[in-house]
Image (cartoon, rainbow, N blue to C red):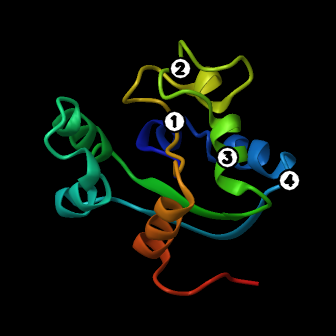
């Protein structure tokens, strides 16, 4: 998912280009704006954590772009391309290093497990498997 800061900075095309150049196939994409309820549901695993409210408030600042990707070892590979949550600790050349500002405002979200990837795909795209 491209977060509101990535959308505001007109980085959608650049981020998608990086992903595609790394061998991923985009199988669905959509832009939407979170409601508070939807943002809280998406990040429900972080409820009660000190950063939860700050994250939710940030996610309400503008639209996001949800992207369903396909590729071998997709979760692991995408996490490497995206980089550490903290842009200052992210590997040189990673998306968050190039475009992130801080731990919250870091351009993108990437699923951390195959199970979370499935949950997040259903969250944005329903039960359909792919668009081809």
The kind of secondary structure element at disc 2 is loop
The kind of secondary structure element at disc 4 is loop
> Residue 57 falls in which quadrant of the image?
top left
Task: Name the residue located 32 percent from the left edge and 58 percent from the top edge.
Answer: 42
Q: Is residue 2 above or below residue 53?
A: below
Ranked by sequence position, the earlier of labels 4 and 3 is 4
Q: Which residue is mark 1?
A: 107
* x then y, percent, for residue 91: 67, 19
Nearer to me, 53 or 116: 116
Task: Name the residue located 18 percent from the left edge and 56 percent from the top edge.
Answer: 36
Disc 2/disc 1 C-alpha distance (Å): 10 Å
* x then y, percent, for residue 95: 65, 32
- In the drawing, does residue 35 fall left or right of residue 20? left
The kind of secondary structure element at disc 1 is loop
Mark 1 nearby-residue class (10 Å; few <14, some 14–19, many ≥20): many
Mark 3 nearby-residue class (10 Å; few <14, some 14–19, many ≥20): some
Q: Quadrant of the C terminus?
A: bottom right
Ranked by sequence position, the earlier of labels 3 and 2 is 3
- Farthest residue in the top direction? 88
Q: Which residue is mark 4?
A: 23
Disc 1/disc 4 C-alpha distance (Å): 20 Å
Q: Which residue is mark 3?
A: 76
Of tags 4 and 3, the one toward the viewer is 3
Q: Which residue is mark 2?
A: 87
The kind of secondary structure element at disc 3 is helix
Ranked by sequence position, the earlier of labels 2 and 1 is 2
């Amino acid at each position: 998912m491209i977060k509101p800061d990535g959308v505001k900075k007109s980085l959608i095309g650049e981020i998608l280009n990086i992903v595609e150049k790394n061998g991923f196939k985009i199988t669905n994409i959509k832009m939407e704006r979170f409601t508070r309820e939807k943002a809280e549901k998406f990040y429900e695993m972080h409820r009660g954590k000190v950063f939860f409210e700050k994250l939710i408030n940030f996610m309400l600042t503008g639209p996001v772009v949800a992207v369903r990707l396909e590729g071998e070892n997709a979760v692991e590979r995408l996490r490497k391309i995206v980089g550490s949550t903290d842009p200052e600790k992210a590997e040189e050349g990673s998306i968050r290093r190039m475009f992130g500002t801080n731990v919250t405002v870091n351009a993108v979200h990437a699923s951390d497990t195959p199970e979370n990837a499935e949950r997040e795909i259903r969250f944005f795209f329903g039960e359909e498997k792919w668009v081809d």
